[in-house]
Image (cartoon, rainbow, N blue to C red):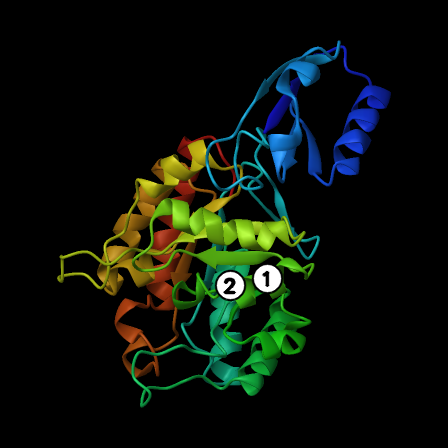
Amino acid sequence: MVILLKNTASEENIKHLVEELEKKGLSANYSKGSTSAVVGIIGDTTKLDLDDLEKLPYVDRVRRVSEPYKAANRKMHPEDTIVKINDQVSVGEGSFKVIAGPCSVESEEQMIEVAKRVKAAGATLLRGGAFKPRTSPYSFQGLEAEGLRLLLEAKKETGLPVVTEIMNINHLDLFADVDLIQVGARNMQNFDLLKVLGRSNKPVLLKRGLANTVEEWLMSAEYIMAGGNKNVILCERGIRTFETYTRNTLDISAVPVLKKLTHLPVIVDPSHATGMSWLVPQLAKTVVAAGADGLMVEVHNDPPKALCDGAQSLDPDQFDSMMADIKRRVEFENKSL
């Protein structure tokens, strides 16, 4: 349920309203934007009388929210959410952010070389997989805790905040110095993991499951937000369709759809969507045009020798070229990089 307030509503009015709602066991979230102010209510709202609420002199109107996701719903929070990462990077405030780095951490030399190159080209966050969920049990699974250490060494060397994927609830303590925790496509509906992340204060990058609808994806975000953690970034990374030429099918339409449905920032990962490095720069152009808040790209210093997903990784020179093009397009869209 959403209570839209009149411009005459005072701070005292709002405080009293929120307190009364909380006394009824409901969660009330006040959100004030440039053109509107709302109180979003989460919980069993059947106990509320809409007529009584609308009679309050500072209430404009009351609307029920039919969608199952509440905290993530733009109706509850009309203004865009800005997710701050380590007080260093803000995602969703109007500029375009780029996350870049190898699929998996392989060595200290590799991570530092890639980190320096992507930073010089304009990347704002460094990605790298320490724990790798793989379809085959015989594939490289990542360096695990040692991979996290090497990723953090690259962070010390370059100052770039780091993004890496968590797979197990029991690993959360290892991620204490990670700036943005990624939940991968295979764990999008690992609800126990989402609940734990909801009780943490770490920003979360939530990737779409390879066979999940937008609503299911938003419900996974809701799990995190229901626990109290509002710092969620959504990442479209392609879905499984009947097409087999590409690894997955990039659902670029998900960007404007999400912008309509939710206030959360949205980024896109064309590397996992296509599985082909030559397609990544082409699709990166559409990511800017679609109105996304950022881009996630895999970059490896020597893709043919990569231990994981080399075919979809750009080399540093290709990344430089792509970033030069992205900068021109971002400027055309009147944003900053």
Q: Residue 4 is drawn in which quadrant?
A: top right
Amino acid type for the residue under numbered disc 1: Lys
Which of 49/87 is in front? 49
Mark drawn on residue 191: 2
C-alpha separation, residue under disc 1 versus residue under disc 2: 6 Å
Residue 187, quarter of picture: bottom left
Relative to 70, say whether 124 is above or below: below
Whether residue 23 can be seen here: yes
Q: In the rendered image, which residue does mark 1 sit on?
A: 195
Query: Residue at left 13%, top 62%?
Result: 244
Q: For the residue marked with disc 2, what is the amino acid?
A: Phe
Q: Which is more toward the observer, 231 or 267?
A: 231
Taking the image as shown, residue 100 lies to the left or right of residue 195, namely: left
Q: Residue furthest right?
A: 12
Graded by Cα atoms within 10 Å as few (under 14), some (14 to 19) or many (20 or more), the crowding at tag 2 reads few
Residue in the image at 81% along x and 32% along y: 19
Residue at 77 percent of width and 15 percent of height: 9
Q: Give the residue at x 27% y 79%.
A: 304
Q: Nearer the viewer, residue 145 or 209?
A: 209
Residues at discs 1 and 2 in contact (Cβ within 8 Å): yes
The image position of residue 130, as x and y in percent, is: 50, 79
